[in-house]
Image (spheres, rainbow, N blue to C red):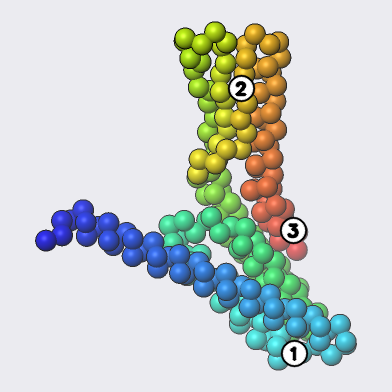
């Protein structure tokens, strides 16, 4: 007979697979939305925008924005999809803007939608930062039997991937300072890559 622990492990595994499938489904729907947007842009560039497609794009974008993979009740780690959500939000507001230009909605509707998307994205970013920061760093103690004193120092992300590493030898002036500067530079680069682009989208949405 399966123990309670075994049953829980099976349940957790099934849930993990279901959530992963939902994330793949979200990405597939988003790619489909992107392709439809490109087709609409082609029609608009010839002064004959496909207005029926524009309506379909609105429905499709709402399906993407409200996808279950982005629902915290369904996916505990939904905030890790903040980067993709930022892209989806940008596409969604582009569709709203186009509907405004075609006379279907007022500018205030576009602004309200943009601020709602910004709030959602800001919440995801806040949770993502809370999960990812601070980064992990440390230095391994030198071998007491080794004639040369060396500290193997490292900086890792939350998943254990190395962002920087350096062997600090105290006998060399400036070694410790070099490592501190390298660590600071790599941490700033990590934040710029993982967070700053999302924040930029939030700022643009709030400016509408």
The one nearer the camera, 177 or 206, is 177
Q: Nearer the viewer, mark 2 or mark 3?
A: 2
Q: Which residue position holds label 1?
A: 51
Instruction: Mark 2 and mark 3 in contact? Answer it, CB < 8 Å.
Output: no
Q: Does 169 sit above or below residue 34?
A: above
Question: Which residue lies at the image location 55% right of the left edge and 41% below the top edge?
Answer: 161
Question: Which residue lies at the image location 63% right of the left edge and 78% below the top edge?
Answer: 32
The one nearer the camera, 127 or 113, is 127
Q: Nearer the viewer, mark 1 or mark 2?
A: 2
Q: Residue 123's spot in the image, x, y percent?
A: 56, 54
Q: Residues within 10 Å of mark 3 (few under 14, many from 20)?
A: few
The image quadrant that residue 191 belongs to is top right
Q: What separation in Å lies between label 2 and label 3 (alpha carbons)?
A: 42 Å
Q: Which residue position holds label 2?
A: 167
Q: Which residue position holds label 3?
A: 204
Q: Residue 74's spot in the image, x, y percent?
A: 41, 65
Is any part of residue 175 visible from this angle? yes
Question: Which residue lies at the image location 70% right of the left edge and 10% below the top edge?
Answer: 173
């Amino acid at each position: 007979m399966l123990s309670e622990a075994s049953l829980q492990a099976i349940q957790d595994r099934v849930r993990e697979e279901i959530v992963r499938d939902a994330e793949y489904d979200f990405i597939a729907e988003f790619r489909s939305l992107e392709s439809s947007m490109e087709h609409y842009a082609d029609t608009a560039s010839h002064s004959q925008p496909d207005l029926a497609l524009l309506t379909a794009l609105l429905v499709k974008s709402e399906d993407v924005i409200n996808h279950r993979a982005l629902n915290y009740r369904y996916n505990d780690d939904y905030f890790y999809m903040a980067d993709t959500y930022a892209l989806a939000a940008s596409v969604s507001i582009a569709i709203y803007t186009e509907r405004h230009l075609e006379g279907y909605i007022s500018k205030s509707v576009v602004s309200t939608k943009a601020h709602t998307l910004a709030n959602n994205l800001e919440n995801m970013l806040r949770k993502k930062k809370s999960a990812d920061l601070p980064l992990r760093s440390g230095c391994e103690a030198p071998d007491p039997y080794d004639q040369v004193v060396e500290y193997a120092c490292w900086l890792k992300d939350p998943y254990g991937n190395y962002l920087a590493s350096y062997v600090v030898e105290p006998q060399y002036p400036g070694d410790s300072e070099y490592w501190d500067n390298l660590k600071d530079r790599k941490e700033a680069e990590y934040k710029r890559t993982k967070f700053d682009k999302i924040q930029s989208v939030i700022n643009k949405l709030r400016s509408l």
